[in-house]
Amino acid sequence: MTDKTTAAQFPSMDNVKKLVEDQSHRMSQLFDEAGKAHTKWIEYGNTQIDEVSELMKTQFNYFNELAVSWRKLSMDSMKKTMESFGG
């Protein structure tokens, strides 16, 4: 048996070229969309970092205020205790 192939069984070069161009266009669109998604992801991440940083600053300031208040209350309490002993 001989294997007879005809030109109709193979895609023409024009068809191959069109397929390659279509695939290239689709890949370009895919990468464009991936780039947009990546940019949004980075922006979201930066926003989250900023918010966490702000929260930590607020917590540190609040802790400092509590420590100042605790020291003041401790001193006031100590003074009152000393006064009650006649000091």
Image (spheres, rainbow, N blue to C red):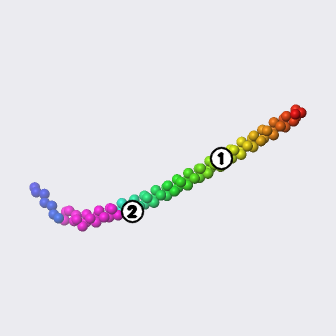
Amino acid under label 1?
Answer: Gln
* Amino acid residing under circle 2: Gln
Q: For the residue carrying disc 1, how many other residues have a C-alpha within 10 Å: few (<14), some (14-19), or many (20+)?
A: few
Q: Residues within 10 Å of mark 2 (few under 14, many from 20)?
A: few
Which element type, helix, strand or loop, lies under badge 1? helix
Q: Quadrant of residue 79?
A: top right
Residue farthest to the bottom, as pictured? 14
Q: Residue at x 25, y 63 (%)?
A: 16
| Residue that badge 2 annotates | 29
Q: Examine the image and state in which quarter residue 14 appears.
A: bottom left
| Residue 15 among magenta residues | yes
- Measuring from the top left, give residue 1's x and y in whole percent: 10, 55
Q: In the rendered structure, which segment of residues is drawn in magenta? A: 8-25
Q: Is residue 5 left or right of residue 37?
A: left
**In percent of the image, x 69 and y 47: which residue is there?**
62
Residue 22 in the image: x percent, y percent?
32, 64
Q: Which mark is residue 2?
A: none
Residue corresponding to mark 1: 59
Front-most of 27 and 83? Answer: 83
Residue 81 in percent (x, y) is at 84, 35
Give the Cα separation between the discs numbered 2 and 1. Answer: 45 Å
In the picture provided, is 78 more to the left or to the right than 15? right
Residue 2: say if magenta.
Answer: no
Q: Quadrant of residue 77?
A: top right
Q: Residue at the right extreme?
A: 86
Q: Earlier in the sequence, mark 2 or mark 1?
A: 2
Residue 8 in the image: x percent, y percent? 19, 65
Residue occupying image coordinates x 37% and y 61%: 28
Q: Main secondary structure of the magenta part?
A: helix
Callout 2: helix, strand or loop? helix
In terms of depth relative to the viewer, which is nearer, 29 or 43?
43
